[in-house]
Image: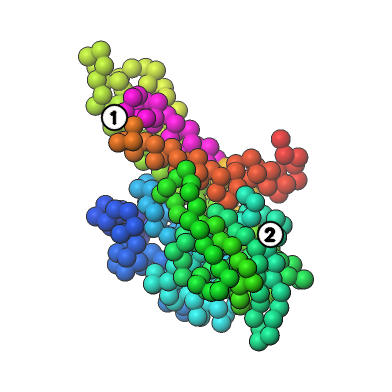
Amino acid sequence: MRTTEEQEELRSAVRAVLGRHPGEAAWRPLTGQIGVAGLAVPEEYGGAGYGAGEVHVVMEELGRELSPVPYLGSAVLVVRALLASGDAEACARLLPDLASGSLVGALAWAENGSWDASAVAAGATAGPGGRWRISGTKEHVLDGAGAGVLLVAARTGAGVSLFEVPSDAPGVTRETAVTMDSTRAQARVVLTEAEGRLVGAEGAGGRILAEVLDLACVALAAEQVGAAARCLDVTLDYARERVQFGRPIGSFQAVKHRLADAYVLVESARSAALGASFAAAAGDPELSRLAAAAKSACSEAFSAVAGEMIQLHGGIGITWEHDAHRYFKRAHGSAQLFGPPAWHRARLAAELGLTAA
C-alpha cells in the first residue's frame, strides 16, 4: 500500500504551510491556498471530491506538528456526518462554507465519556414548524467553543437522531474544557430547550454515528502515526548529537535496541493506519474491523514512542522548554478520543464473533 504521487505533493504543500504558519494561524492558508477543508467534500458542494487517502495525508502532517487547527472536528466529523445523513438540503446549505473553511462545525456527540450511539441520553421533542427542542449535555466536543454550527445527536421517539443547532442559539451554553492536551480544543456543550433542525431521517442517528466513528478512527490513526514518526525523528536526531563518555548516545547498543523497537512500532502503526485508509477510500465492508484495529494499534504505538522520546532525552525530556511533553500529552489524550484501545478491541472481537479478552 502506497500513497500516490499526487498525495505526496499534497503532503509537501501541507508541510510547507505548517512550517511557515505555526499554530492556529495555519488554518487560513491551509483552507485558502490548499483547500484542505474541502478535500473530502463532493464537487457539487464546492469541494475537491477526494476521499480518505487525501484526508490521511493531511492528518499525518497535522499530527506531525500537533497542529491545533479544526480539521478533524469540522472537515472530517461534521462533513462526514452531513454526507452520511443523505440530507441534500442540509448538505447544500452547509457544505460549501465548511469546504471553504469560512464555517467551522462541531459534532456534539459523546456523553459520559462514550462515543457509542447507544449512550446518547440527550433528548429532542418536536415543535411547530418542523423545529425541535433539544436538551442534554455533550462532552469532548472538538472545537465546540469556536464552531459556528453544531450537529447534535439526541434521542427522539424513533431513536437517536441528528440535529443542526446554531452555536449561538438561545439555550446553548459552551464551556472550553480544560484538558491534559492543550493542543486539542474541546468543549462541554449544554443544551436547554435549544431549537434545532432535523438532519436526515428521524432515528437515523445511530447509523450515521457508526459510519462517522469508523472514519474518525481512520483519520485519528493517521494523525497518531504522523505524531509518533515525528517523536522518533526528533529522538534519533538527539541520539546522534548527545555525547556521553566521549561518544554519541545513539552508538550504545541499549539505545539502538530501544530506537529499533520504536521504529517497528511506528511502521507497524503506519501499516494499520494505511490499511484502514485504503479500506475507507474503497468503501470496503471490512472498514469497521480495520478502523477498530488501527485505532487500537496506533493509540498504543504513539503512547509508547512518546514515552521513549522522554526517556531517551533524559533530563531535558521532562522540561517545559522541550516539546516532548506536548507529544506525550497528545498521545494519551488521543488514545482516549473516540474510545480507548480496549473498547475498540472489544468492537473488533464482536465484529469477528469472538469474546473480547
- Of badges 1 and 2, the one in the foreground is 2
SS state under label 2: loop
In screen coordinates, is 275 left or right of 18? right
SS state under label 1: helix
* 265 in magenta: no
The reply to whether residue 237 is visible in this rendering is yes
The image quadrant of residue 8 is bottom left
The image quadrant of residue 231 is top left
In screen coordinates, is 218 left or right of 350? left
On-image quarter of the C terminus? top right
Chief secondary structure of the magenta span? Answer: helix
Residue position for label 2:
120
Q: Position of residue 159 (x, y in %)?
A: 74, 67
What are the residue bounds of the magenta stretch? 297-318
Q: Position of residue 52 (x, y in %)?
A: 49, 60
Task: Identify residue type, mark 2.
Answer: Val
- In this picture the colour scheme is rainbow
Q: Residues within 10 Å of mark 1 (few under 14, many from 20)?
A: some
Residue position for label 1:
238
Sooner in the amino-acid sequence: mark 1 or mark 2: 2
Q: Residue at x 55, y 40 (%)?
A: 297
Q: Residue at x 65, y 44 (%)?
A: 343
Disc 1 from disc 2: Cα separation: 46 Å
The reply to whether residue 52 is visible in this rendering is no
Task: Identify residue type, mark 1.
Answer: Tyr
Q: Position of residue 315 (x, y in %)?
A: 33, 24
